[in-house]
Image (cartoon, helix red, strand yellow):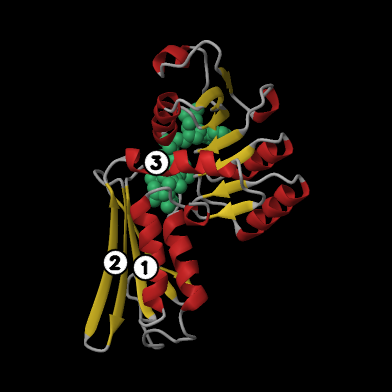
Amino acid sequence: MIRVFLAGYNGSMGQKAIHMIQETEDFELVGGLAPSANDNDKSKYGLSDEVKLFTNLNEINVSADVWVDFTVPNSVYQNVKFAIEHKMRPVVGTTGLSDDQLAELKGLSRSNQLGGLIAPNFGLSAVLLMKFAQEAAQYFPDVEIIEMHHDDKKDAPSGTALNTAKMIDKVRPAHEQGADDNVETLANVRGGDYNGIRVHAVRLPGYVAHEQVLFGGAGEALTIRQDSFDRGSFMNGVKIGIEKVMDVNELVVGLENVM
Ligand SMILES: NC(=O)C1=CN([C@@H]2O[C@H](COP(=O)(O)OP(=O)(O)OC[C@H]3O[C@@H](n4cnc5c(N)ncnc54)[C@H](OP(=O)(O)O)[C@@H]3O)[C@@H](O)[C@H]2O)C=CC1
Ligand SMILES: O=C(O)C1=N[C@H](C(=O)O)C[C@H](O)C1
């Protein structure tokens, strides 16, 4: 049995995760964290009386094998630090960790000899998109990324888009892209810039999570696109993450690295 603690249990992803954990024979939900947590949530979300709910880290008095995190960018670092220090292996979907924070957490995971997983995206289509985009960038160094999300999303660009840019940046030949005498007549119209890779973030009702990577070449173009139409699409990856993290000895980034 794998005992799971769920941070952000009442959010959009948290509610899907509760369902997945309850449906999985080998998983047991032992606790949840959310600033608005209260005992009425037990009936609201179909939780058993044994599940303990907490409104902040200082209150937590249960232990678990795995800490699943779907919270907010400004709490994820403290949450993961807490989890590692309390011997709970983090499986993190929350976006927004800086490179410095990630490096610190990797060090903490090493010194506590406790593995974990940080996955910018748990959806198989997005994992494959990033892999294919990295391969394509070796041949098509001119590239831009467009991510499209629901209008409740708090951070931009998406963790997936940023990770895609980082993966492309690792392999694409050193390169100046576009004209250097561009004039923007509307501020920021060319999007964000990650080492010369332009990233554009769209927020619209009706959307869930989508990304396109556009490559341009001499007289040709390649577009790679993925769509998550339902948050349920992430749950198979979260389940794999919880299972695999039990055998991992370091803090791994990317679902593909534990599959
Ligand atoms: N890696 C992946 O595959 C995916 C990652 N995500 C990421 O997961 C995160 C959550 O997304 P989503 O479920 O849509 O967001 P929601 O806004 O629906 O949920 C956020 C959750 O975080 C809780 N929360 C808010 N503030 C804090 C805090 N200070 N400490 C602890 N918990 C807090 C909220 O509780 P309360 O309601 O009480 O405020 C709520 O439970 C985002 O970063 C998103 O980008 C999303 C989808 C897939
Ligand atoms: O907030 C979301 O919804 C999502 N967040 C993650 C991200 O920022 O990449 C994963 C997915 O795109 C959905």
The residue tagged with tag 1: helix, strand or loop? helix
Which residue is denoted by mark 2 in the rendering?
224
For the residues labelled 1 and 2, the Cα–Cα distance comes to: 8 Å
Crowd rating for badge 3 (residues with CA inside 10 Å; few <14, some 14–19, many 20+): some
* Of residues 187 and 47, the one drawn nearer to the viewer in this rendering: 47
Q: Quadrant of residue 66?
A: top right
Q: Residue at x 65, y 46 (%)?
A: 115
Amino acid type at circle 2 is Ile
Q: Nearer the viewer, mark 1 or mark 2?
A: 1
Which residue is denoted by mark 1 in the rendering?
132
Crowd rating for badge 2 (residues with CA inside 10 Å; few <14, some 14–19, many 20+): some
For the residues labelled 3 and 1, the Cα–Cα distance comes to: 20 Å
Which label sits on residue 62?
Answer: none
Asked whether the beta carbons under mark 1 and mark 2 sit within 8 Å of each other, the answer is yes
For the residues labelled 3 and 2, the Cα–Cα distance comes to: 22 Å
The residue tagged with tag 2: helix, strand or loop? strand
Amino acid type at circle 3 is Asn
Residue 197 picture location, percent across and down? 43, 74
